[in-house]
Image (spheres, rainbow, N blue to C red):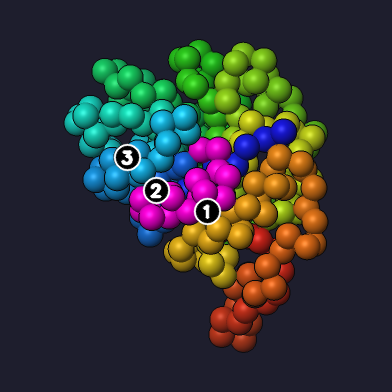
C-alpha cells in the first residue's frame, strides 16, 4: 500500500492536501521548472501548517542552476530535499556531494525517466550514487512535463527493489493518472507523487482540489482505479489544428 505525495505551491494548498489524506507534502513552484524551487518563505509557511507527523519535502531545482543552500535555517523542519540533474556536468557526483555537506535534511536522489532528453545521468548511475552516499530515497520523475514516459515494469522492478532492500524510500512521479497508478502498483513504491492530477482541471498551475487528492489517495492505497473516482470535468489539455482544446480523460499529473 503506497502513500500519496502532493506537490503544493502554498500553505493553503497544503491544508487542502492534508485534509484529503496526503501522506507527504512537497513544496515546489511549477512555473520554475519540473523541480522548480519555491521561495523559502513558502517552505516555512507550509511547514507551519502541516501537522508534525507528516513529512514536508522541498524541490530545489537543478544542479546546474547552482541553488543557494547556504541558509541552513531555511530547511528547519524540512524532512527531505531533492535536486534534479538535467544537463548535469561530468563532475555531478562531486558537485552534488559538496552541496550536501553541512545540511542535515535528508536527500532524495532524482532519476529522470526521460534522462536522455534531459541530458541527465543514466538511472543506474544515480541509483549507485544514492546507495553509496546514504540518500534517504529515490524519486523517478519526468523532466519533460509535456509528455508521459511509460515505465516498463520489467526494466524498473530490479532497480527499485534494490533501492528498497537498501532501505531507501521509493517514489514514482511523472504525469501519473489513476490508471497509471494502478498499473505501476507491482513496482511497490512507497509513494506516488503528483501535482497536476491533484489540481483543478488537471492543470499543474491550477489550485489543489480536495476531491482529486482523495481519489488519488484511494488509488495509491488500494491500487484500484475506479471510474467512479473520476471527476466529470474535462481533465487533459491537448492541441489540435493550432488550438488548445479540452478533452475528457483520466486525472493527469503534468
* Quadrant of residue 12 within the rendered picture: bottom left
Looking at the rendered image, the quarter that the C terminus falls into is: bottom right
Of the two numbered discs 2 and 1 on the same chain, state the one appearing first in sequence.
Answer: 2
Residue under the point 77% across and 43% down: 223
Looking at the rendered image, the quarter that the N terminus falls into is: top right
Kindly identify which residue carries mark 3: 48
Which numbered disc covers residue 40?
A: none
- Residue 188 belongs to the span the image colors magenta: no
Kindly identify which residue carries mark 2: 28
Kindly identify which residue carries mark 1: 195
Q: Residue 109 in the image: x percent, y percent?
A: 49, 29
Q: For mark 3, does the 10 Å Cα neighbourhood hold few (<14), some (14 to 19), or many (20 or more) residues? A: few
Spatial CA span between label 3 and label 1: 21 Å
Q: Nearer the viewer, residue 228 or 254?
A: 228
Q: Secondary structure at mark 2?
A: loop
Q: Does the CB distance between marks 2 and 3 fall below 8 Å?
A: no
Residue 210 can be seen in this image: yes
Relative to 13, 100 lies left or right? left
Spatial CA span between label 2 and label 3: 16 Å
Residue under the point 43% across and 50% down: 15
Q: Which residues are magenta?
A: 9-24
Relative to 154, 132 lies left or right? left
Q: For mark 1, does the 10 Å Cα neighbourhood hold few (<14), some (14 to 19), or many (20 or more) residues? A: many
Q: Residue 13 in the image: x percent, y percent?
A: 43, 55
Of the two numbered discs 3 and 1 on the same chain, state the one appearing first in sequence.
Answer: 3
Q: Secondary structure at mark 3?
A: helix
Q: For mark 2, does the 10 Å Cα neighbourhood hold few (<14), some (14 to 19), or many (20 or more) residues? A: many
Q: Secondary structure at mark 1?
A: loop
Q: Nearer the viewer, residue 62 or 224?
A: 224
Callout count: 3
Amino acid at each position: 500500500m503506497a502513500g500519496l505525495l502532493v506537490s503544493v505551491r502554498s500553505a493553503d494548498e497544503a491544508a487542502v492536501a492534508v485534509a484529503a489524506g496526503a501522506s507527504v507534502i512537497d513544496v515546489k513552484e511549477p512555473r520554475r521548472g519540473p523541480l522548480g524551487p519555491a521561495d523559502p518563505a513558502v517552505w516555512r509557511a507550509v511547514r507551519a501548517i502541516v501537522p508534525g507527523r507528516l513529512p514536508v519535502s522541498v524541490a530545489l531545482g537543478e544542479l546546474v542552476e547552482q541553488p543557494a543552500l547556504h541558509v541552513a535555517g531555511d530547511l528547519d523542519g524540512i524532512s527531505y530535499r531533492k535536486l534534479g540533474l538535467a544537463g548535469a556536468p561530468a563532475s555531478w557526483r562531486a558537485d552534488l556531494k559538496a552541496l550536501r555537506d553541512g545540511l542535515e535534511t535528508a536527500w532524495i536522489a532524482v532519476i529522470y525517466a526521460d534522462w536522455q532528453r534531459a541530458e541527465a545521468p543514466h538511472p543506474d548511475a544515480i541509483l549507485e550514487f544514492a546507495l553509496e552516499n546514504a540518500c534517504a530515497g529515490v524519486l523517478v520523475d519526468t523532466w519533460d512535463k509535456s509528455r508521459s514516459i511509460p515505465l516498463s515494469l520489467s526494466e524498473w522492478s530490479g532497480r527499485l527493489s534494490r533501492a528498497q532492500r537498501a532501505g531507501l524510500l521509493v517514489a514514482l512521479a511523472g504525469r501519473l493518472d489513476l490508471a497509471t497508478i494502478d498499473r505501476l502498483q507491482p513496482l511497490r513504491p512507497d509513494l506516488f507523487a503528483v501535482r497536476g492530477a491533484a489540481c483543478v482541471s488537471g492543470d499543474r498551475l491550477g489550485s489543489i482540489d480536495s476531491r482529486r487528492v482523495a481519489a488519488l489517495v484511494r488509488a495509491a492505497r488500494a491500487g484500484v482505479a475506479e471510474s467512479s473516482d473520476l471527476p466529470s470535468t474535462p481533465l487533459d489539455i491537448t492541441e489540435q489544428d493550432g488550438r488548445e482544446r479540452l478533452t475528457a480523460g483520466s486525472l493527469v499529473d503534468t
